[in-house]
Image (cartoon, grey):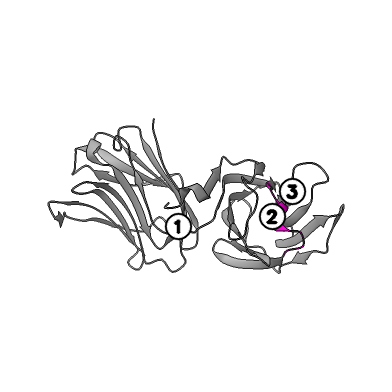
Amino acid sequence: MANSQQQTFYKPSAITQITGGLKEGKTVIIIGRISSNANTSNISLKDGTHPAASTALCISCENDQQRIVYKTFRNDSWDSDQPTSESPLLQDQLFTIKILVTTQAYKISANGKDLMVYDHRIPFTQMNTISVEGMELDFIGHLNLVVTSYKKELMDGPKHGKVIVIYGIVNSDCKRMEINLRHRYGIAFHYLCRFEEDAVVRNTWRDGAWGVEEKSQDIPFKNGEFFEIKITCNVEQYGVSVNGQQVHTYKHRFTNLDDIDVVEVCGGLELFSLEAKDP
């Protein structure tokens, strides 16, 4: 991400401090599942963790009534609720909530669909804590810029045991999305999703030309939904997993793995995080 210093990602936790507090233009991202035994689940933006802390925004999912209520806690009491007609969040199903901070309001969306514009009742600059209840978390982060493409340097190539992990959301109108493992002279592994064809292509670019495509149907992504991609590498092939399920393999055509020095992600997506984890 060209402005990686503006991206902050956290190990999922019920209480999370927002580094530097909320600022205009910042987007808070929360990914997880409603707990199966939770009657109510809450996401709150607060000014601390003490019992009397103010809450600028509480997104309260009333799971038994399948609705969401929005409210604020200040001066030791809750303001009047703003409910929606129906909640898109279902128990035990993965969700992605985004909260965009603007000058006038929080703009809230879930799974790519707009939910609410909630006017500020407390200055958002005072908020420094995310509190989550009744949810199983996969991911929490915040960013100042939406990133749609990114190149990251790989140290020592995709050696055995290294895992490339990518978090993001596929745009609702996405036509193509690709991941490339590059070296100085070409592309060792090209992973391309063609959404209009519902097809995934794997290939290698070398000596100035593409090789023979490996192509399969059934893209393992859904428009508007969060994804986690893991790319692993062993002596024979790459493995690609999406949301915990292995979906594709690709045998090496370019075998000088130490020469692979860049991973690139681009296309119709919002990219949250790209990491290369050593074994």
Q: Which residue is mark 1?
A: 147
- As shown in the figure, which amino acid type bears the numbered disc 3? Asp
In percent of width and height, residue 210 lies at 17, 56
Q: How many marks?
A: 3
Give the residue displayed 83% in from the left and 46% down from the top: 52
- Mark 1: which amino acid? Val
Indicate the secondary structure of the residue bearing disc 1.
Answer: loop
Amino acid type, callout 2: Thr
Q: Quadrant of the C terminus?
A: top left
Q: Earlier in the sequence, mark 1 or mark 2?
A: 2
Mark 3 — residue?
A: 47
- Furthest-top residue in this view: 279
Mark 3–mark 1 CB contact (< 8 Å)? no
- On screen, residue 257 versus residue 14, left or right, reads left
Quadrant in the picture for residue 17: top right
Task: Please tell me which of labels 3 and 1 falls first in the chain.
Answer: 3
Determine if residue 267 is in view: yes
Disc 3 or 2, which lies upstream in sequence?
3
Q: Nearer the viewer, residue 261 or 114?
A: 261
| Residue that label 2 marks | 125
Label 2 element class? helix
